[in-house]
Image: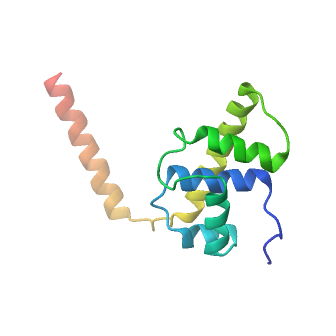
């Protein structure tokens, strides 16, 4: 499957949000997730003035301006709050898809259940 030629404004916003909030996520991983080159990812973020890892809350105005430029519309504060929540959720979904799922481990599950039961018992004895 080939990558779409252009990213939607929402996808661009999600990408910028991830870079702003999670600077530790390698650009190569994002390039893989969004099917773009590392340079394209860097350009999308740099053009918006986003500093990777500086925190999305601190760069909220830059994220908002970039989104408004991409869509060509001006958002009210209420509309931006709604859109920013959607962007955060989409970013979380992207990051969850990138994290490998652990293999089931019945021994670890049993040990954790025993530990939890022991802790509950001790908490009841102390309280």
Give above or below for 33 relative to 64.
below
Q: Nearer the viewer, residue 38 or 100?
A: 38
Residue at position x 66%, y 58% from top?
A: 47
Q: Quadrant of the C terminus?
A: top left
111 sits left or right of 46 in the view = left
Which quadrant holds residue 42?
bottom right
Camera-nearest residue between 27 and 96: 27
Residue drawn at the location 82% of the way across and 69% of the way down: 4
**Left or right, residue 4 beside residue 43:** right
Residue 107 position within the rendered picture, expressed as x and y whole percent measured from the top left: 32, 63
Q: Which is nearer the eye, 5 or 124?
A: 5
Residue 122 to residue 25: above or below = above
Left or right? Give the position of 72 relative to 108.
Answer: right
Residue 87: image x %, image y %? 67, 45
Quadrant of the image occupied by residue 122: top left
Q: Quadrant of the N terminus?
A: bottom right
Q: Position of residue 70 (x, y in %)?
A: 79, 50
x and y, in percent, of residue 69 in the image: 78, 47
**48 relative position to 104: left or right:** right
Pick whichever, 17 or 54, lies toward us.
54
Task: Determine whether 84 is above or below 104 in the image.
Answer: above
Does residue 112 sit above or below 108 in this rendering? above
Residue at figure coordinates x 22%, y 39% from the top left: 119
């Amino acid at each position: 499957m080939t990558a779409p030629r252009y990213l939607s404004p929402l996808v661009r916003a999600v990408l910028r949000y991830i870079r702003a909030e999670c600077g530790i996520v390698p650009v190569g991983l994002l390039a893989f997730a969004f099917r773009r080159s590392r340079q394209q990812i860097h350009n999308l973020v740099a053009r918006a003035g986003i500093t990777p890892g500086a925190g999305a809350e601190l760069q909220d105005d830059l994220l908002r301006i970039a989104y408004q430029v991409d869509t060509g519309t001006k958002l009210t504060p209420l509309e931006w709050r709604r859109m920013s929540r959607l962007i955060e959720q989409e970013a979380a979904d992207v990051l969850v898809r990138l994290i490998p799922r652990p293999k089931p481990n019945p021994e670890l599950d049993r040990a954790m259940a025993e530990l939890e039961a022991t802790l509950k018992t001790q908490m009841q004895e102390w309280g």
